[in-house]
């Protein structure tokens, strides 16, 4: 008997000390502020947070018990990614002391920076990681690259390691590049921080996710989605068949923002029923310039194009006492539940707050023309037809630590 107990004791202890699952649902939250894609624009982000009353002019938490949700895509296209990440890290701590919460969700651009797809990373973002040793570090990596190429030189010959070769290599690896790659790696400050976060969360009766959830996710649990994405960003061998680069997955899906509402009505109903929510909030797909409701308000688009790379629009979602509002340039507007007269009036109110011409003017004219012709409003209302990142492939960057 003693031997059998000894054999089973390690198993019992392992079960007893299994770490609890990371929290992904919260209830009883009175006030929620949700901000969409930031894309490296610190000033615009700080302005919107200040308008929402969650920070003061110096970026210190003033939101009390508010839950702030940032739905991902802090990096790329703008210069101040590192500064924004540092701000979010500090606000996490400050909010917690006041009984509030900061939820920084993983977006496709956080994932891309982790696994080495740097197509949209700007020179200024790399430069933010420069140190006085950056030239020495880059020189060492260049010598490693030369040695690797020499060891693997094909029979027909390889590149000439001349001045043009080095110039081209250095243009691809600006000063700060290797420090950036380290800091987004598994041992780096930002890589460790991002890998701990959620992809999708539920606050009260609202689901928040960066891109959306395609039909393949209508029966998945929040825990499974979050653990799977975190696992793939820790083990890149899981990415190829995984959900972090799946066009229908939580980081990339655009159907809720762009798909035909009649065709997707059943899918949206399934998502709402499965997760027990009344609405789904997504970023990832830029709108015409403010928060836009779809599917009768059951889907809410909050990537308003905040970054100067998308026009520098100022709007975010506020859910106060269960009612959804838009904070458009700091003004509180009730979010409509329809795509007709209510939406048109709402857009006119928002446009009146913008410096002329408002980016919403074209959408307003389109809705007015549809109303005059007694036609249904455009089913892709509010979406900006701009070039966006696509999950083409996983980069196997040799400098990804």
Image (cartoon, helix red, strand yellow):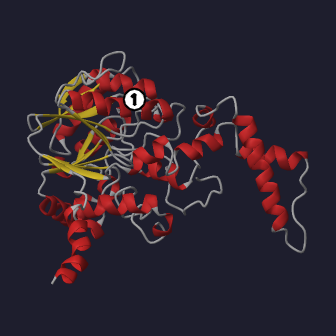
| Residue under the image location 39 percent in, 21 percent down | 356
The N terminus: image quadrant: bottom left
Q: Nearer the viewer, residue 371 or 276?
A: 276
Give the image quarter of residue 116: bottom right
Name, please, the residue furthest toward the front. Answer: 2
Label 1: which secondary element: helix
> Whole-percent x and y of residue 201?
23, 50
Give the image quarter of residue 73: top left
Residue 219 appears in the rendering: no
| Residue under the image location 35 percent in, 33 percent down | 360
Instruction: Classify mark 1: residues with Cα within 10 Å, few (<14), some (14-19) or many (20+).
Output: some
> Whole-percent x and y of residue 56?
30, 17
Q: Nearer the viewer, residue 323 or 76?
A: 76
Residue 311 appears in the rendering: yes
> Whole-percent x and y of residue 78?
52, 34
Q: Nearer the viewer, residue 340 or 108?
A: 108
> Whole-percent x and y of residue 319?
16, 36
User: Which residue corresponds to mark 1?
Assistant: 87
Give the image quarter of residue 361: top left
| Residue under the image location 10 percent in, 45 percent down | 27
| Residue under the image location 85 percent in, 50 percent down | 165
Count of marks placed on residues: 1
Name, please, the residue furthest toward the top. Answer: 57
Q: Nearer the viewer, residue 347 or 302?
A: 302
In this view, 199 is above or below 96: below
């Amino acid at each position: 008997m003693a031997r059998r107990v000894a054999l089973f004791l390690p198993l019992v202890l392992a079960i007893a000390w299994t770490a609890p699952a990371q929290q992904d649902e919260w209830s009883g939250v009175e006030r929620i502020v949700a901000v969409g894609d930031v894309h490296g624009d610190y000033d615009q982000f700080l302005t919107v947070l200040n308008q929402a009353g969650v920070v003061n002019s110096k970026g210190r938490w003033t939101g009390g018990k508010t839950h702030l949700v940032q739905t991902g895509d802090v990096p790329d296209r703008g210069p101040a990614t590192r500064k924004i990440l540092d701000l979010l890290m500090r606000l996490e701590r400050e909010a917690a002391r006041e009984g509030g919460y900061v939820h920084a969700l993983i977006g496709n651009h956080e994932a891309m920076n982790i696994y080495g797809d740097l197509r949209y990373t700007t020179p200024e973002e790399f430069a933010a990681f420069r140190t006085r040793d950056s030239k020495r570090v880059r020189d060492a990596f260049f010598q490693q690259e030369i040695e690797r190429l020499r060891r693997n030189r094909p029979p027909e010959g390889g590149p000439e390691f001349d001045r043009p070769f080095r110039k081209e290599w250095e243009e691809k690896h600006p000063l700060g590049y290797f420090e950036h790659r380290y800091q987004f790696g598994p041992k780096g400050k930002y890589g460790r921080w991002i890998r701990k976060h959620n992809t999708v969360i539920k606050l009260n009766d609202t689901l928040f996710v960066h891109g959306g959830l395609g039909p393949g996710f209508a029966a998945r649990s929040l825990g499974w989605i979050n653990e799977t994405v975190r696992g793939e960003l820790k083990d890149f061998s899981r990415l190829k068949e995984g959900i972090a680069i799946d066009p229908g997955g939580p980081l990339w899906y655009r159907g809720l923002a762009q798909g035909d509402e009649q065709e997707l009505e059943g899918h949206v109903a399934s998502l709402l029923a499965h997760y027990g929510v009344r609405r789904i909030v997504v970023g990832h797909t830029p709108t015409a310039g403010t928060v836009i409701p779809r599917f009768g308000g059951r889907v809410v688009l909050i990537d308003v194009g905040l970054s100067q790379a998308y026009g520098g629009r100022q709007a975010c979602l506020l859910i106060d006492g269960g009612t959804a509002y838009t904070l458009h340039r700091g003004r509180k507007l009730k979010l409509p539940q329809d795509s007709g007269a209510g939406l048109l009036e709402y857009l006119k109110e928002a446009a009146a707050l913008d410096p002329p011409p408002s980016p919403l003017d074209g959408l307003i004219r389109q809705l007015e023309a549809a109303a005059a012709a007694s036609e249904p409003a455009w089913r892709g209302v509010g979406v900006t037809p701009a070039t966006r990142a696509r999950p083409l492939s996983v980069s196997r960057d040799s400098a990804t630590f």
